[in-house]
Image (cartoon, helix red, strand yellow):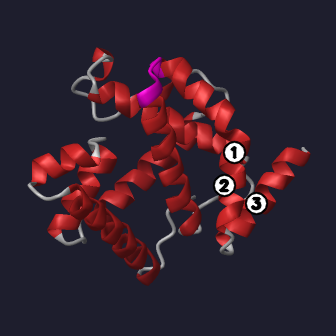
Amino acid sequence: MEIQIADSILIQDYINGDERALETLINRHNQRLSSFIYSKVSDREITEDIFQDTFIKVIRTLKRGRYNEEGKFLPWVMRIAHNLIIDHFRKSSRMPMFEGSSSFNIFSVISDEKLNIEKQLIKTQIDEELILLIDELPVDQKDVLVMRIYKDMSFKEISENTGVSINTALGRMRYALINLRKIIEENNIVLTN
């Protein structure tokens, strides 16, 4: 229990502006999360990419105040990694069972008693609400965001697809996230149940 309490304190510290608190959290769970990702993808480079993307999502969620205090940090981070692993497999077409299906059952890939149907439905609802918000962004920012988050493209691939430099693509992603946060705040939208 002490570890979970310590996690929640670190999360609060990070939300309150202490960047080092996140570093502590990442270091604490690095081994467990990396091992979990690697056990599914069996590739060091892909493991690193998914690990980084997991914490990009963690940071976005914490900064938006969307983290549920009652949740446990590690299972929550693992769920984010689960979804990114599934996205990776769907993108690489190594899971034909998902072909032509806009929705999929996470249980067919990873069994985890902490992932129940209700949470999956909530995630789907959050995704649908986010898509509507993303539509309000300027086209160049929206394109980069969709390619990165929904198509799981690297910034190098985004750069090649849009004809802009990697730095410009990164900049557009940054502004897209800033603007998305503004839209969420201005509309007082709550993306959690």
Is residue 136 depicted above or below 142 in this figure? Answer: below
Distance from Cα at disc 3 to Cα at disc 2 = 10 Å
Does residue 66 belong to the magenta stretch? no
The image shows residue 131 at horizontal and vertical percentages of 31, 58
Q: Is residue 143 above or below residue 36?
A: below
Query: Which residue is label 3 attached to?
Result: 10
Q: Is residue 131 visible?
A: yes
How many angstroms separate mark 3 from mark 1 (CA)? 12 Å
Question: Tags 3 and 1 in contact by the CB under 8 Å rule?
Answer: no
Secondary structure at badge 3 equals helix
Q: Secondary structure at mark 1?
A: helix
Q: Nearer the viewer, residue 187 or 148?
A: 148
Query: In the rendering, at what x and y percent does residue 120 appear?
Result: 51, 40
Q: Which residue position holds label 1?
A: 27
Q: Quadrant of the N terminus?
A: top right
**Quarter location, residue 41:** top left
Q: Which residues are magenta?
A: 41-45
Dot 3, crowdedness within 10 Å: few (<14), some or many (≥20)?
Answer: many
- Distance CA(mark 1)–CA(mark 2): 6 Å
Marking on residue 23: 2
Picture layout, residue 141 above or below residue 108: below
Residue count near mark 2 (Cα–Cα under 10 Å), binned few <14, some 14–19, many ≥20: few
Q: Can residue 109 be seen here? A: no
